[in-house]
Image (cartoon, coloured by chain):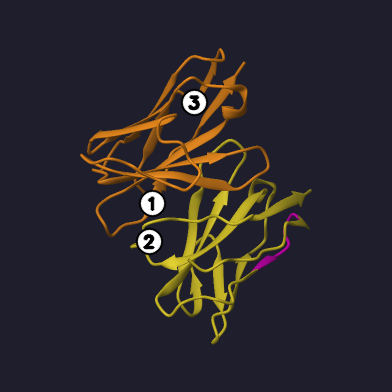
Amino acid sequence: GAVVSQHPSRVICKSGTSVKIECRSLDFQATTMFWYRQFPKKSLMLMATSNEGSKATYEQGVEKDKFLINHASLTLSTLTVTSAHPEDSSFYICSARQGSLGEQFFGPGTRLTVL
Amino acid sequence: LAKTTQPISMDSYEGQEVNITCSHNNIATNDYITWYQQFPSQGPRFIIQGYKTKVTNEVASLFIPADRKSSTLSLPRVSLSDTAVYYCLVGASYNTDKLIFGTGTRLQVFP
């Protein structure tokens, strides 16, 4: 199957700082990428859907000014957690899909810890 | 998207067959049933997808009754490495704009 990578795999930051997480599709062009958040022992929660070259669509309850998503190319989407707080500590997972018809391939996730 | 209900957890022993059932009473005509596997601190991995009757691949089988209001993921002869969370999702095949994950079933395989 197709490969999706995330960078970094783990990040620790201080409260109030911003953190950027990258999601890359390595061997295919992803017109759509999704960002999920997962708290310990909980299920994945969809945060937003991003289409290449357009603004992301955020799920209800997700602050778009806090979680900035950029999908500037067909192989890269970034999620920036701005002014991070300890409650933003979570496992962030992206997925990528080629075109409007296609399976979603998931990245390995990024563990964010905000001190 | 149809809501799904799965057991929160299941235990098994190595070598046994494990069947995880998912209820999706409100499944729509166009909906497919997809199962994902997730290991700790990893992204989910696609296991199998089906629409009706039975689907089998090298990893698992998926049984879907005629009314499609439930489905059963069957894992033959599980090993310790099958310890994971298994998610049942219902939505349009591949064309699903969103994947809505339910609570999942935490499978623990013992030696």
Q: Nearer the viewer, residue B57 or A57?
A: A57
Instruction: Look at the image and give the residue range highlighted in magenta.
Output: B13-21
| Mark nearer the viewer, 3 or 2 | 2
Say which residue appears at 52% left-offset and 21% top-offset: A84
Q: Quadrant for residue B65, please give it.
A: bottom right
Q: Circle 3 marks a residue in which chain?
A: A
Three-letter code for the amino acid on which mark 3 is drawn = Ser
Residues at badges 2 and 1 in contact (C-beta under 8 Å)?
yes
Q: Position of residue A112 (x, y in %)?
A: 55, 25
Which of the labelled discs sits on residue B52, or is there none?
none
Chain assigned orange:
A
Name the residue that disc number 2 marks: B96
Secondary structure of the residue carrying numbered label 3: loop
Quick one: label 1, few (<14), some, or many (20+) residues within 10 Å? many
Chain assigned yellow:
B
Name the residue that disc number 3 marks: A9
Secondary structure of the residue carrying numbered label 2: loop
Name the residue that disc number 1 marks: A104
Question: From the viewer's perspective, is B80 left or right of B51?
Answer: right
Q: Circle 1 marks a residue in which chain?
A: A
